[in-house]
Amino acid sequence: MTMTLTLRTEPPARVLAAPLAPERLCGCSASAVAALEIRCGGDTVAVGDLFEVSGGGIEVDELVLAGDLRRFDGIGAGMSRGEIEVRGDAGAWAGADMSGGVLRILGDAGARLGAAYPGARVGMTGGEIVVTGDAGEEAGAGMRRGLVAVGGNTASGAGLRMLAGTVIALGSIGAEAGLGNKRGSLVSRESVRPLPSYARSTRFRPPALRLQLLRVRALGLVVGDELVNGSWARWSGDRTELSRGEILMFENGEERT
Amino acid sequence: MSSYALGATHVDDTFAEAFPMRYARVLITAATDAWALEAARSMTGFATSVIGCKCEAAIERALAVDETPDGRPGIAVLLFAMDREGVGKRVLERVGQSVMTCPTTACFDGLPGADRTAALGGSLRYFGDGFQASKVIGGQRFWRIPVMEGEFLVSESVGIGRGVGGGNLVIGAGDEDAGLSAAQSAADAMRGEGIALPFPGGIVRSGSKVGALTSKSMPASTNHQMAPTLRAQVDDSLVPDGVGALFEIVIDGVSEEAVRESMRRGLHAAAAAGATHVTAANFGGKLGEFHFPLDALRDPP
C-alpha cells in the first residue's frame, strides 16, 4: 500500500525526515501520520502542517514524498525495507545508515547520500539508492554494502572510507573519489583523475558491473547499452588501505598504453 | 503382453518406473551463443547415468538474451543426482571445471527462491586465492573471481529442487535406420522446459538390466532380453517380432507432470516417425515411486 505526502509549504528550518519511512508508518492512518511531530530546526512541527497526507494503512510498503525537499535531511535514513520515492530534490543524509529497501530520488540529492553518520565507521549496510540527478559531497561514505546509483554526477569525496558496496555515477564520480576505500567499487562514466593512491590495472568488461547496470536500469535510470556492453578501465586502490577497492571508468575507445 | 495401436505402432500396455531425485538448474551465459553452448556441453559431458557418472545432466534449452540475468545469450542446464549433497558436489565440480574455465562465461542459479540450496560461488570463490570479491545485486550475492581473461561471475549458491529421474520410452522398428530415425524424432519432441535427456543425443542404445547373470558384483549389465541379436539365443527374449533395433530414451524431469508430458510427446512423435513398437522399462513396479503407464499417454499432446 502506498502513502503519499505532498509538500504544501516550505518548512521554516531544516527538517529531520528520518521518521518518514514505510516501516515506521505501517499501521498508521493518514490522520495519524499528519499528527506526527518531526524535528524542524530547534523545534518540532506536525507532518500535517508541512504535507498533505493521503493513503496509508496496515501495510505501508511504499512512501511517496512529493515536492522540493531540499530542506529535508535524512529521508530514508536507517530504512530497512520498503520503498521511498522522492518526487523532487532531497536534502542531505538521504539513505544514511540504510540497511535495506529502495530509495528513489527523482531529482538531486544533497551531501552524504547513503553515508555514515559522523563518528560512525559504518554507513549503509544494504539496500539500493537511485538518484536521477546529481548527488552532493561524500556520497556512500563509510558504505559497507548496497548500491548508490546516480544518474548525473557525484560531488567530491564519493566513497570516502568505503568498506565495500558500490557507488555508480552515470556522469562523473567527481574529485577525490575513494579516499580510504577498502573493498568498495566506484563507477564513473566520465573519466576522472584518480587519487595518487590508485593504480591502473587493465581495461575489461566487468561481468558484475554489467549485472549492476542492468539492475540500475530496472530501478529507473537511463543506462545506455554502450555502458552495459562496453569496456571499463579498472583502477585499484586505495593503496593506503587494503588496495582491494576499485574505480571503474568507462573507456570504450583504444586501450591506453 | 497386451498392447494398443497408435496408427501402425504397437504400444505395450506397460509402464515406465522412475525415482525421486534432486536437481539444480544452472544458467550459463557467455559473449556468444557458441561459447555458452561450449560450456554447457562440457558441463553436461559424462553425465548420462548416476550409476556410472554420479549425476545425470543435460541441456534443458537455449535462453534468449531477455531471459538471462546479464542480458547475454545463455543455456539452461539441468543436473540431477540422488540427493541434495550429490547435486551440490557435482554442480560445484562441473561449474569449476567446465564453466569457469570456458572463455567469457558467467554462471547463475536457475532456481532462485528455492527452499534448499547448495553452495556454488560460496565454495568456488576460494579459487580466487583471497582476491575474490562479492557483490549483492538485486538481493542476490555473487562472487567475482579474478581469472586470466578478466573475471568469472558466479552465483553464491544454487537452488535444489525435487525432481523425477528415470522416465523412459523404448522405441523399436524393423531396422537400425528406421528405429534411430523414430527415436531421434521422439527425442526432439521430448526436450523442453523442465526436461533433461542425459544420454548422447538423448538416446541410449545400450539399455541395462539390474545386476548381471555372470557376476554378483556388477550393478548393471546389458538388457539381453531387448537385444535383437540374442532373440534366437536366449529363452526370455522380449524383442517383438519384426523389430530389428531398439533405442531407449531416458527422461529426467523437474516434476512427475513434466516427465509424463514429455513421454506423451515422445510416444506420438515416435509413432508418427515410423516406430513399429514402443514399450517402457521398469523393475516390476517395486523400486520406483513413480509409474508412467503408456496406456495413459494415448491422447496426443
Image (spheres, rainbow, N blue to C red):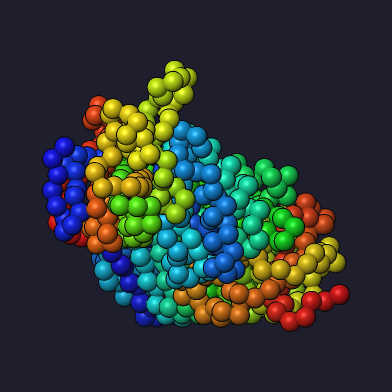
Q: Quadrant of the C terminus of chain B?
A: bottom left
**Seen from this angle, which residue lies furthest front?**
B232
Q: Please provide percent x and percent y for residue A228.
A: 59, 74
Q: Please provide percent x and percent y for residue A119.
A: 66, 52
Q: Quadrant of the N terminus of chain B?
A: top left
Whether residue B175 is situated above or below residue A166 in the rendered picture: above
Whether residue B39 is situated above or below residue B67 in the rendered picture: above
Whether residue A20 is situated above or below residue B222 in the rendered picture: below
Q: Please provide percent x and percent y for residue B290.
A: 25, 37
Q: Residue at x 51, y 37 (%)?
A: B53
Query: On the picture, is A229 further left or further right than A197?
Result: left
Observer-nearest residue: B191 or B173?
B173
Q: Please provide percent x and percent y for residue B113.
A: 39, 50
Q: Residue at x 36, y 35 (%)?
A: B230
Say if residue A99 shows up in the picture.
Answer: no
Observer-nearest residue: B192 or A169?
B192
Query: On the picture, is B49 further left or further right than A48?
Result: right
Say if residue B6 shows up in the picture.
Answer: yes
Q: Residue at x 60, y 74 (%)?
A: A229
Q: Residue at x 41, y 45 (%)?
A: B205
**Seen from this angle, which residue lies furthest top?**
B216
Query: On the picture, is B157 further left or further right than B208?
Result: right
Observer-nearest residue: A235 or B150?
B150
Q: Residue B264 falls in which quadrant of the image?
A: bottom left
Observer-nearest residue: A35 or B42?
B42
